[in-house]
Amino acid sequence: MSKELVFGHQKPDTDTIAAAMAYSYYQNQLGYETEAVALGEPNDETKYALKAFDLVAPRIITTAANEVAKVMLVDHNEPQQSVSDIDKVQVTHVIDHHRINGFNTAAPLYMNVRPYGCVSTVLYEMFMDKHIDIPANLAGMMLSAIISDTLLLKSPTTTDHDKEAVYALAKLAGVDYEEYGLEMLKAGTNLAAKSDNEIVDGDAKTFEMGDLTLRIGQVNTVDLNDVFARQADLEKAMQTLMDANGYDTFVLIVTNILNSDSDLLVLGKDTDKVAQAFGKELDANHRINLPGVVSRKKQVVPPLTEVLG
Amino acid sequence: MSKELVFGHQKPDTDTIAAAMAYSYYQNQLGYETEAVALGEPNDETKYALKAFDLVAPRIITTAANEVAKVMLVDHNEPQQSVSDIDKVQVTHVIDHHRINGFNTAAPLYMNVRPYGCVSTVLYEMFMDKHIDIPANLAGMMLSAIISDTLLLKSPTTTDHDKEAVYALAKLAGVDYEEYGLEMLKAGTNLAAKSDNEIVDGDAKTFEMGDLTLRIGQVNTVDLNDVFARQADLEKAMQTLMDANGYDTFVLIVTNILNSDSDLLVLGKDTDKVAQAFGKELDANHRINLPGVVSRKKQVVPPLTEVLG
């Protein structure tokens, strides 16, 4: 059996890095030869988690076929989110928690996909099913992944499976998950080091709703003022992106991870309808406050689709 | 939680029927409300298995959206092999052992795919992982499925997982798997009741190789003479299908399930190359004998692709 590479999606987040490390470890325990790699640098939050548990970031690759014939994917299945030459290697395993989109194979494979808040929760259950012990530092990394994806179990994407995994992994890692988790999330919100463009567009996605092309970005913070002190510059960056890419409307979700509230900053066409989707009116600063809203996928896109779609 | 339907592919075989029954039972044990249904009548082999274990064939449906909003798929994922209105329902679960092809979802789902010889082996392991007891008659049906898909563990698609599942399920069902399995396979080879067209085309698939369009059918028997006594009529049926559908070459794999050998009957263009793919020459009856060959997917298509492709 020749070596296989294990990796997550491009622009890696904490879950994608942790899942590659955890699944590679799991496969090696079962007797396979695998190596966890990444498609980019870890972000600030992931670096904090790696340091906290004394782990080294996976090696970064840009292509796979020059090294191996077979690969294992974690935390993604869509080819455009994967390694650039994904069409030149055989995918033998997929562990994921996303929808299936554009993923086709020539041969049968091993695929474990579950609708949980975090793929590290799927992996935690796989370790349990096969009675494979999780080392303390790897447990800490998987814990970090679930905290990151579920915003400390507060996102509506959180399932009971995620909660059980967090409690068990925190025990294995020997940390208080709430205390550690908040510090880790804070480490990921170092906005001072980010450009205006990174803040408004770093995590943004495009949606077509009715006649409108919407761009919806999201940024986490521990203090909304850290973001809105720069509002004039952020608006300039949003306007430039709208002009350059033909977005009709730009929505920036600014999420306070301490109290799980968000402010939306809305520019462009039909901003009144955007506000109306949440039963609100825009204030003089082009903002609306949405208590309890943290998930773009579950709490922002659906009401917008309802009104605009 | 509203009811969901569980079903396998069109033109159901023993594995697809058994898997729908087993997975529906499994989900109901976990507290879901599901019903196993089928997209067509059971074949002779499946009828034999159902009767042997005193089970009733699942209800047949032609559409799903008129009954339910959500469905669970077993033994297939490709939309064109599924229920006619698959695009109008949400797929929440997939249990399969085939390649992934054209399967896309709008939302995350539960998906367990493993490269085993039979999907009932995947299900057997799921029952074990969750410590759910398998009733004797359901175990018999799952055993029948694995025997059918692996031709009594002799097909090269057979994995160690399939073998372990067969030994365990035979114990649960209280049968000698070799004795029972042979009787069941024989029941599926009642060729006297089948038309020439059913024999040559009932299980046939089309393959593009190089400039050629090949049609490759397969039929199981306990005596090659049962098939070749009708060779002139079968050749007429093959020629008619070639003319009507533009197939360049027609290969009929006639498999003796007693000794795991096959004869290929080859008509059309480049028949010498087809024989050459197996290091043989066609005999005067347009046939070649291939000892130990039982799998179209693993033993017939690859060498043909090598020479023609």
Image: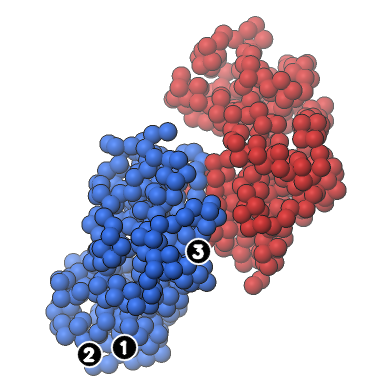
Chain colours: A blue, B red
Residue B22 lies, in percent from the top left, at 70, 52
Instruction: Identify the amino acid type marked 2.
Output: Asn
Instruction: Identify the amino acid type marked 3.
Output: Pro
x 56%, y 24%: residue: B300
**Same-chain status of marks 2 and 3:** yes
Q: Nearer the viewer, mark 3 or mark 1?
A: 3
Q: Is residue B133 above or below residue A72?
A: below
Mark 2 or mark 3, earlier in chain? 3
Residue A115: which disc? 3
From the image, tell me which residue sits under label 2. Answer: A285
Q: Is residue B87 left or right of residue A147?
A: right
Q: Is residue A119 left or right of residue A199?
A: right
Q: Are marks 2 and 3 in contact (CB under 8 Å)?
A: no
Q: Is residue A212 above or below residue A137?
A: below
Question: How much space separates mark 2 and mark 3, taking CA atoms?
Answer: 38 Å
The chain letter under disc 3 is A
From the image, tell me which residue sits under label 1. Answer: A288
Instruction: Identify the amino acid type marked 1.
Output: Ile
Looking at the image, which is closer to me, A251 or B286? A251
Q: Residue furthest front?
A: A174
